């Protein structure tokens, strides 16, 4: 158990391990295709092949063994004839990588023997534990000088509300960035379609006079420019390893912490009621009080982990804004380039003098 005043930083968590989850190119199965993943751990120097159901198996073990820890939900499984769409498979792969990253960097879960088996052994054999972390860690008496249970409960309520607001704010920012990215991509598609329309208008005709030819040449230059500009890549937000990934990791970590708080709130009320109903000095009441304190101490540590991810996400916002600003600048440059291509000297209207 770490001290309540210990600071957890994103850099410390990141140094624990770097996880990679990649799709195996060939899907297995005759009718209902399933995917396999190459799972790599820098810490262990290993690469193993895993199926989605094996991720589920590890998650189930952790939920039983660590009821007082913030274990994220896995992305949903979707059984589709043919194996599912490429977009769905890529999003699920990225979500599995984030899930395993949070687990492999966790101050407690990172040292779990079942996680080591998952990352290192070719065949996965996991059995659900018979006891949770509280029993496995022992029930020794608390050292003197620690916070009282009431103080820990008050800190738990306060921290829960603070991180709830952080989660709501980050989630709102992420949705805004998604909408902005969608609009930017839609504008690129409009420019591409504009280029095709201009190209159709640029075809010369036998009846064209010099003025028509001047306009058609300008239109052809604009059409070629639109096609060229749309083919050139625009810098996108990196949701795998860059600033975007920090926001998604933070949202996953904060979501798991919020679910933990909700789960503990229900359980802690029951434990307090049971402890109050039991005889004050009985072994059962003492065990309930120790479990209560243990749960609050675990949640305090989980809040520090969630804060570390949230802080890293907030610190990366400037990079997200820079990337989005650069993308909009490129789109603005497209329109400016089209304007320049279509610009041509005006033809003065000559008037005839009548004598």
Image: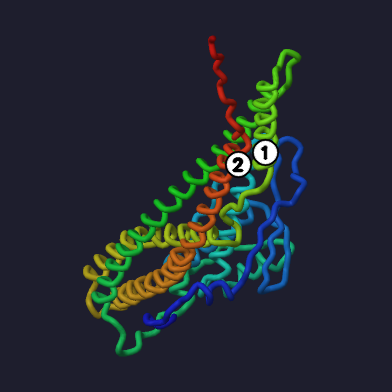
Element carrying mark 1: helix
- Expressed as whole percent of the image width and height from the top left, the position of residue 338 reads 60, 37
Residue in the foreground of this view, choosing between 94 and 297: 94
Q: Residue at x 30, y 89 (%)?
A: 145
Element carrying mark 2: helix
Q: Residue at x 57, y 37 (%)?
A: 339
Quadrant in the rendering for residue 299: bottom left
Residue in the foreground of this view, choosing between 259 and 62: 259
Q: Residue at x 74, y 51 (%)?
A: 24
Quadrant in the rendering for residue 157: bottom left
Residue in the foreground of this view, choosing between 26 and 333: 333
- Expressed as whole percent of the image width and height from the top left, the position of residue 293 reads 33, 75
- Expressed as whole percent of the image width and height from the top left, the position of residue 173 reads 42, 53
Does residue 183 show up? yes
Count of numbered badges drawn on the protein: 2
Q: Quadrant of the C terminus?
A: top right
Residues at circles 1 and 2 in contact by the CB criterion of under 8 Å: yes
Residues packed near mark 1 inside 10 Å, few (<14), some (14 to 19) or many (20 plus): some
Q: Quadrant of the N terminus?
A: bottom left
Q: Which mark is residue 133?
A: none
Q: Is residue 308 left or right of residue 185?
A: left
The answer to whether 315 is drawn above or below residue 93 in the figure is below
Quadrant in the rendering for residue 285: bottom left
């Amino acid at each position: 158990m770490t001290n309540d005043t210990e600071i957890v930083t994103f850099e410390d968590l990141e140094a624990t391990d770097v996880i990679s989850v990649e799709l195996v190119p060939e899907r297995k199965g005759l009718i209902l295709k399933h995917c396999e993943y190459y799972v790599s751990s820098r810490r262990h120097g290993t690469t193993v092949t895993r199926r989605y159901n094996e991720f589920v198996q590890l998650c189930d073990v952790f939920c039983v063994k660590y009821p007082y820890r913030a274990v994220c939900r896995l992305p949903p499984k979707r059984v589709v004839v043919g194996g599912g769409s490429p977009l769905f498979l890529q999003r699920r792969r990225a979500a599995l990588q984030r899930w395993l990253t949070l687990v492999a960097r966790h101050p407690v879960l990172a040292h779990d023997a079942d996680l080591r088996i998952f990352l290192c052994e070719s065949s996965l054999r996991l059995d659900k534990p018979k006891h949770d972390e509280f029993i496995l860690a022992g029930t020794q008496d608390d050292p003197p000088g620690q916070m009282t249970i009431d103080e820990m409960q008050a800190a738990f309520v306060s921290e829960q509300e603070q991180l709830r607001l952080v989660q709501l704010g980050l989630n709102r920012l992420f949705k805004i960035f998604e909408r902005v990215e969608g609009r930017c991509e839609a504008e690129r598609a409009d420019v591409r379609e504009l280029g095709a329309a201009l190209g159709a208008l640029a075809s010369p005709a036998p009846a064209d006079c010099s003025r028509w030819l001047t306009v058609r040449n300008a239109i052809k230059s604009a059409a070629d420019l639109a096609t060229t500009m749309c083919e050139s890549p625009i810098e996108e937000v990196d949701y795998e390893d860059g600033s975007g990934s920090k926001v998604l990791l933070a949202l996953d970590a904060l979501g798991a912490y919020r679910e933990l708080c909700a789960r503990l709130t229900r359980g802690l009320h029951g434990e307090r009621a049971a402890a109050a109903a039991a005889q004050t000095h009985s072994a059962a009441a003492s065990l309930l009080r120790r479990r209560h304190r243990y749960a609050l101490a675990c949640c305090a540590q989980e809040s520090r982990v969630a804060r570390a991810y949230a802080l890293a996400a907030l610190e990366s916002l400037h990079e997200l804004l820079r990337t989005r600003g650069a993308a909009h600048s490129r789109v603005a440059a497209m329109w400016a380039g089209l304007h320049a291509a279509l610009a041509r000297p005006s033809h003065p209207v000559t008037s005839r003098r009548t004598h």
